[in-house]
Amino acid sequence: GENVEQHPSTLSVQEGDSAVIKCTYSDSASNYFPWYKQELGKGPQLIIDIRSNVGEKKDQRIAVTLNKTAKHFSLHITETQPEDSAVYFCAARNQAGTALIFGKGTTLSVSS
Amino acid sequence: GAGVSQSPSNKVTEKGKDVELRCDPISGHTALYWYRQSLGQGLEFLIYFQGNSAPDKSGLPSDRFSAERTGGSVSTLTIQRTQQEDSAVYLCASSRDSLREQYFGPGTRLTVT
């Protein structure tokens, strides 16, 4: 079945810097890749997603890139702010389309 | 509109007792998912419901776990004879259909003592 690897597990940046989180997936049939932000004590919040028919998608300070050949996708956050501090999860939809398979998360800390 | 809601928000139970966790999906969403998040870990898929189709139960870790979805809306996850390793946050998500974005509830934190 699908397997998703995510790194780094922790990332510390200064306010205003960029942050990049990378994920790889194993099932070449996967076609949907969302990113979630989870704050302490809350459920994951969808922040951006990408489908396999595009290579890049942007939404203000957040962008996601997808390389289908290499089977990896990345989250880019520019001009980071303290409120970006949270745990970020990447995911890939399984081949059956019935579930998301998640990476183990990246704890992002933005210091001012 | 209202998001996914879950109840209770916290549940403490003794080992060996049964527990029921409830999920109210977003109105009109036909797909519903349960995930489990253990401390410091990613989310682990448990079960998926889509309309009147047979659920995908492939993620349930043991036969002590079961779930149902009545009337295509509310879902309950039942854990029988709870064990300490069942302690985790149980998250519910819903989507308009299986191809659309999944939206998560706040979760139920289960502690088995």
Image: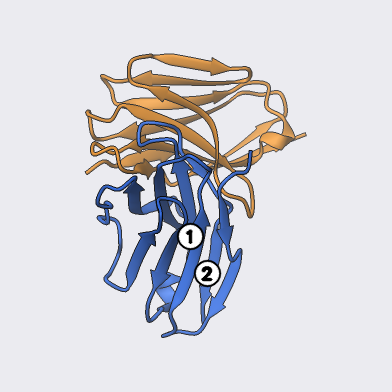
Chain colours: A orange, B blue
Q: Do marks 2 and 1 share a subunit? A: yes
Q: Amino acid at mark 2?
A: Leu
Position in image of residue A44 (x %, y %) = 55, 44
Density class for disc 1 (Cα within 10 Å; few <14, some 14-19, many ≥20) is: many
Residue displayed at 47% across by 47% down:
B93
The residue closer to the viewer here, A17 or B90, is B90
Q: How many marks?
A: 2
Task: Indicate which disc, 2 or 1, sits on the residue closer to the N terminus.
Answer: 1
Can you say which quadrant of the picture contains the C terminus of chain A? top right
Q: Chain of mark 1?
A: B
Q: Residue at x 73, y 35 (%)?
A: A82
| Dot 2 alpha-carbon crowd within 10 angstroms: few under 14, some 14 to 19, many 20 or more | many
Q: Residue at x 22, y 29 (%)?
A: A29
Which residue was labeled with disc 1?
A: B90
SS type, badge 1: strand
Q: Residue at x 56, y 57 (%)?
A: B6
Q: Which residue is mark 2?
A: B110
Which residue, as the protein is rendered here, is positioned at the far front?
B71
Regarding residue B77, the answer to whether it shows in the image is: yes
User: Which quadrant holds residue A87?
Assistant: top right
Q: Quadrant of the N terminus of chain A?
A: top left
Query: Real-space Cα distance between discs 2 and 1?
Result: 7 Å
Residue A10 location (% of width, % of height): 54, 43
Q: Quadrant of residue A91?
A: top left
